[in-house]
Amino acid sequence: MLSEEDAWSIALKIHGLAEVGSREYESSKLLVETLRTEGFSVTSEYMGIPTAFRAEKRLGEGPTVCFLAEYDALPGVGHACGHNVIAAAAILAAVKAAARLKAGRIVVIGTPDEEGSGEWSGSKILLAEKGAFSDIDFVLMTHPGDGWSLGSPSLAVQDLEVTFSGVAAHEAASPEKGVSALDAAILTYTAVNMLRQHVRRDANVVIHGVIREGGKASNVTPDKAVLVYGLRSSDVDYLKQLIMRFRLIVQGCALATNAAYSIRNIGPMYSTTKFNYPLIEYAQNVLKELGVVPKDYKETTNSIPRGSTDFANISQLLPALEITCKIAPEGTPWHSEVSARAAASREAKEALQTVSEALARVAVRLVDDHDFAEKVKQDFRAHA
Ligand SMILES: [Zn+2]
């Protein structure tokens, strides 16, 4: 049976591979092979997504608990978000839970490209749309961080790409023939900056953008300019309104400069995380039993959301729990070289052992304790 040492060596291998989103071929293969060896029946290239997979083991009658695995790295900095630990924890927790259960079903779904690097960006949402979660009752996962906590809030986000098209011309000989796509881009960038001041303060709006392409030579009118933006908010409906405003800005700036434009969504919209309190409370107790004191969840759930995740969409779909495990000293900058080193550290190894045990215990209770499972479901229905 897969040991904690084996799981850690898988975490290190994935860390070394550092494959970016939608291209996690070797990492996915490693997880698939391990789960097959552990007696799970595995579908690779799940639902047409090359690096997704689904593994399952039926122990008997009863509910299905699903562990989510992520294994994508970040371009340039490798496993600076510690997704190698998520993958190892998911398979170790699944193996542990399956070994202890005489009922229910344990599933692991491998979900590529959480960071939004490629074609299958936000794959949890794509998988959910294809029905991957229709036969699942509960979802569990972990995510590494710089402290132990439960109930981390997240921002809804939509990434957008704007392309302006103009007309190239000689900037000295015939500037009147030119239409500058760069002008449209600069105007948009400025107008979006102005929008920032006039947004709801309680909606945690974050708008970040870059001009990715803006021309090649100063004496040629730029006929193509590309902007990439991320629009975020803790209110999904308000985010949709912001996207409308953003589109109008782009349209207006195109009109003002005589450029043509197109707007493309980069991946699906990530939602906000919905909390399941019975799951959070039980996991908090389990962590304490294991010698870890997580931050009081009431503080965490009420904190200002700072990041976004496609796990949020799954938490809106069915009862779900994410445990943040501590792999680095408090205050460690994330998505950095320091956090990338932390994802292969002794602290990460210890976190993997603790969090996989905690997740396994939660899964076992969900299958074995019918009243608890009902309470979890009821809580899900009770909250919007
Ligand atoms: Zn992450």
Image (cartoon, rainbow, N blue to C red):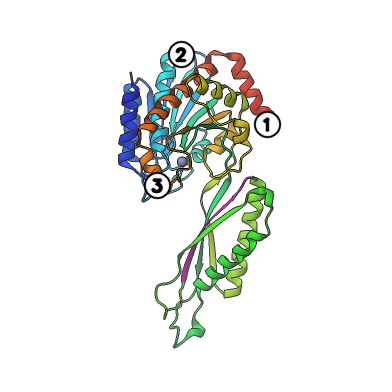
* Coordinates of residue 5 in the picture (x, y in percent): 32, 25
Q: Residue at x 47, y 86 (%)?
A: 174
| Residue with the mark numbered 2 | 101
* Coordinates of residue 157 in the picture (x, y in percent): 56, 48
Q: Is residue 173 left or right of residue 279?
A: left
Q: Amino acid at mark 2?
A: Leu
Q: Is residue 271 left or right of residue 220?
A: right
Q: Nearer the viewer, residue 33 or 342?
A: 342
121 in relation to 70, above or below: below
Q: Of the residues under marks 1 and 2, which one precedes in the sequence? A: 2
Q: Quadrant of the N terminus?
A: top left
Q: Residue at x 45, y 87 (%)?
A: 172
The answer, for residue 133, to whether it is visible in the render is no
Q: Main secondary structure of the magenta part?
A: strand
Q: Residue at x 50, y 19 (%)?
A: 289
| Residue with the mark numbered 1 | 383
State the image quarter where residue 46 is shown.
top left
Asked whether mark 1 lies closer than 8 Å to ligand 1, one says no
Q: Nearer the viewer, residue 54 or 340?
A: 340
- Element under disc 3: loop
Disc 2 to disc 3: CB gap under 8 Å: no
Asked whether mark 2 lies closer than 8 Å to ligand 1, one says no
| Residue with the mark numbered 3 | 74
- Element under disc 1: loop
Q: Disc 3 or disc 1, which is closer to the eye?
A: 3
Q: Which residues are magenta?
A: 224-234
State the image quarter where residue 30 is shown.
top left
Q: Of the residues under marks 2 and 3, which one precedes in the sequence? A: 3
In magenta segment, residue 230: yes
